[in-house]
Image (cartoon, grey):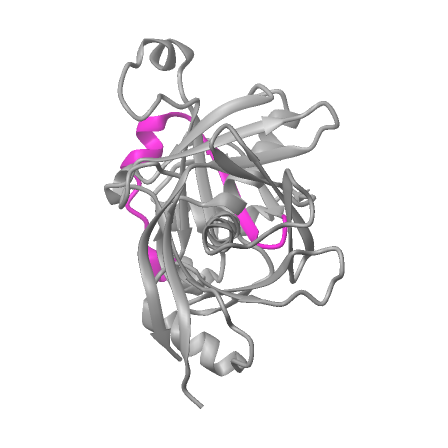
């Protein structure tokens, strides 16, 4: 049966509407079938669409299901922050004053409110060395040569990202991937480069300059390039901070090649927990029939 449901669309990792990554949020998803959720996610054609449900975990404030146009995800970063923003703005009241607890397929995800923005506690990340043959196929699909790849890891924090650290920001921004080849490989691919310290120090542009430039390619799930990606930035942070390549606090940029200006705030606290945060803003508020 088709019913009217509360709906918001939130732009995440930006304070300026339409410069971040939008997520479609159905605030009352109870009673919807998996097929109905997937059909609506295909229709929105956003990288992710979420459905908020009453929690089955007594420690959680709400339950979240996350769909791409191609299928359901166990966890994703910008939908977590955008859905939390929508829930709070719609009157949601967390059990704890300073923290929201989300239930999703990977379990509980903590979200804190500080500095006028939300940040999620990055789930544990498993890292593995990529098979040489697959690395060669990914490099070919991206148009890279071996000299441009500094190092690579397969990172898994729910979503699995085949991740490459490249030699320069210019290399990252110049990529023109063969999305059909990446789709055939069935991999989500993240690329990043550390910004030269002198360039970062001299930058005066708005939004603020970043220490890491990131791009995410996910044709395998129906999203050729994702504007700003929380799960990828979370796993990159856990890898690159642990390896000593980046400091415990840094700012990542993503979305430039899509006309966006996403900024992702990374912080590793004294307990070695990585927090991934950013500003968010509501762009659509209303109802949908599903």
User: In screen coordinates, is 243 left or right of 52?
Assistant: right
Image position, residue 245 (x, y; %): 57, 21
| x 47%, y 75%: residue | 37
| Residue 140 spot, x, y in % from top left | 39, 48
Circle count: 0
Give the quarter of the figure containing the N terminus. bottom left
For the residue pair 30 and 245, the one nearer the viewer reads as 30
Q: Is residue 152 visible?
A: no
Using the image, determine if residue 60 lies above or below residue 227: below
Q: Nearer the viewer, residue 227 or 25?
A: 25
Residue 161 within the segment the image draws in magenta: yes
Q: Residue at x 40, y 23 (%)?
A: 210
Q: Is residue 275 above or below residue 134?
A: above
Residue 93 point in image, percent of width and height: 59, 52
Outermost residue, bottom side:
1
Task: Please tell me which residue is depicted at 47% across the width and 48% down the height of the picture.
Answer: 85
Q: Residue at x 35, y 61 (%)?
A: 46
Quadrant hosting residue 47: bottom left
Q: Position of residue 22 (x, y in %)?
A: 36, 52
- Give above or below for 112 relative to 58: above
Identify the residue at the far left of this view: 259
Q: Which residues are magenta?
A: 157-181
Q: Is residue 74 magenta?
A: no
């Amino acid at each position: 049966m088709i019913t009217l449901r509360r709906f918001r669309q939130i732009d995440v990792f930006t304070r300026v509407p339409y410069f971040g990554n939008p997520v479609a949020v159905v605030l009352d998803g109870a009673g919807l079938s998996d097929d109905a959720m997937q059909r609506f996610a295909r229709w929105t054609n956003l990288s992710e669409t979420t459905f908020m449900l009453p929690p089955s975990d007594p420690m959680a404030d709400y339950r979240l299901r996350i769909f791409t146009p191609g299928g359901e995800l166990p966890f994703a970063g910008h939908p977590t922050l955008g859905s939390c923003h929508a829930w709070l703005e719609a009157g949601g009241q967390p059990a704890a004053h300073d923290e929201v607890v989300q239930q999703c397929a990977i379990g509980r995800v903590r979200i804190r409110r500080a500095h006028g923005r939300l940040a999620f506690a990055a789930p544990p990340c498993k890292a593995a060395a990529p098979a040489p043959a697959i690395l060669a196929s990914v490099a070919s699909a991206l148009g890279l040569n071996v000299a441009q790849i500094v190092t690579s890891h397969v990172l898994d924090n729910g979503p699995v990202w085949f991740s490459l650290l490249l030699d320069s920001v210019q290399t990252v921004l110049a990529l023109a991937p063969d999305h059909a080849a990446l789709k055939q490989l069935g991999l989500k691919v993240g690329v990043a480069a550390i910004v030269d310290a002198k360039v970062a120090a001299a930058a005066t542009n708005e939004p603020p300059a970043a220490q890491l430039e990131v791009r995410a390619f996910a044709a395998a799930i129906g999203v050729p390039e994702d504007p700003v990606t929380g799960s990828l930035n979370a796993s990159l942070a856990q890898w690159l901070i642990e390896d000593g390549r980046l400091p415990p606090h840094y700012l990542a940029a993503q979305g430039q090649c899509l006309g966006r200006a996403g900024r992702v705030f990374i912080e590793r606290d004294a307990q070695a927990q990585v927090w991934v945060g950013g500003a968010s803003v509501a762009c659509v508020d209303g109802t949908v029939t599903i």
